[in-house]
Image: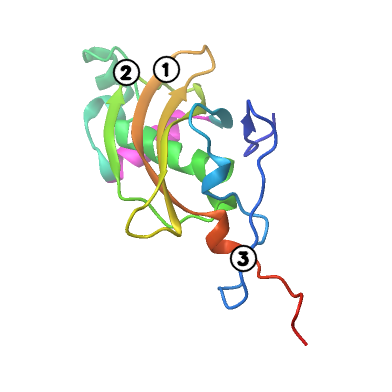
Amino acid sequence: MTRGEAVGRRGRARRCRFAKGRPPLDDDLLCFEDFPVGEVAEFGHLEVTADEIKSFAREFDPLPFHTDEAAAEASFMGGLCASGWHVVALLMRMCCEGYVLRTASMGSNGVDEVKWLKPVRPGDVLSVRRTTLAARVSRKRPEMGIVTFLWEIVTQTGATAAEVRGVNLVATRASRAVPSEAGHA
């Protein structure tokens, strides 16, 4: 699997097209209907380095076990490890490369839960396993689907380092369908 490639167990996803008058967006985007409940997709491939761990931590989470290798060795962590916020940022990058930038995204109303289960260390290679937990069309905005996902950040050994549960808002195919040219002179 190449970087950014998403593989679903149900095969290639159908695409949606945009109606005239919409912003000039890619007409080959994934729509709400392309995320069936129960689907599992795996994507991403990012190697974490000590320099990246320390750089992120110095700016955003300057705890000693994220910024200083000697202090990290002496800490309860037993060695340098990535900030959980860094791990979640890497998840977002892999999601963007894996599917979000190819999706008729309408944003998100947030995440429900983040769990950091195992430390991410220098040299770890991370990937994502995305499971569609629930999907429904919005009652107030029928052009928008609400998709609940579980994203698992998995290391090269198969260990789950973190789990995030949250929502993506995705345009429905019907709201993006190109009207027929038939009957127009």
What's the mark number on residue 181?
A: none
Question: How many numbered marks does the figure carry?
Answer: 3
Q: Tag 3: residue type?
A: Phe
* Residue numbers of the magenta segment: 47-59
x, y percent for residue 122: 45, 23
Q: Tag 2: residue type?
A: Leu
Residue 182 falls in image quadrant: bottom right
What's the mark number on residue 18?
A: 3
- Look at the numbered disc 2 and give the secondary structure of its residue: loop
Write the residue at 31% across / 31% down: 84
For marks 1 and 3 on the same chain, the one whose residue lies earlier in the sequence: 3
Whether pointer 2 and pointer 3 mark residues with C-beta atoms closer than 8 Å, the reply is: no
* Image quadrant where one finds the C terminus: bottom right
* Image quadrant where one finds the N terminus: top right
Whether pointer 1 and pointer 2 mark residues with C-beta atoms closer than 8 Å, the reply is: yes
What's the mark number on residue 117?
A: 2
Task: Classify residue 9 as left or right of residue 73.
Answer: right
Whether pointer 1 and pointer 3 mark residues with C-beta atoms closer than 8 Å, the reply is: no
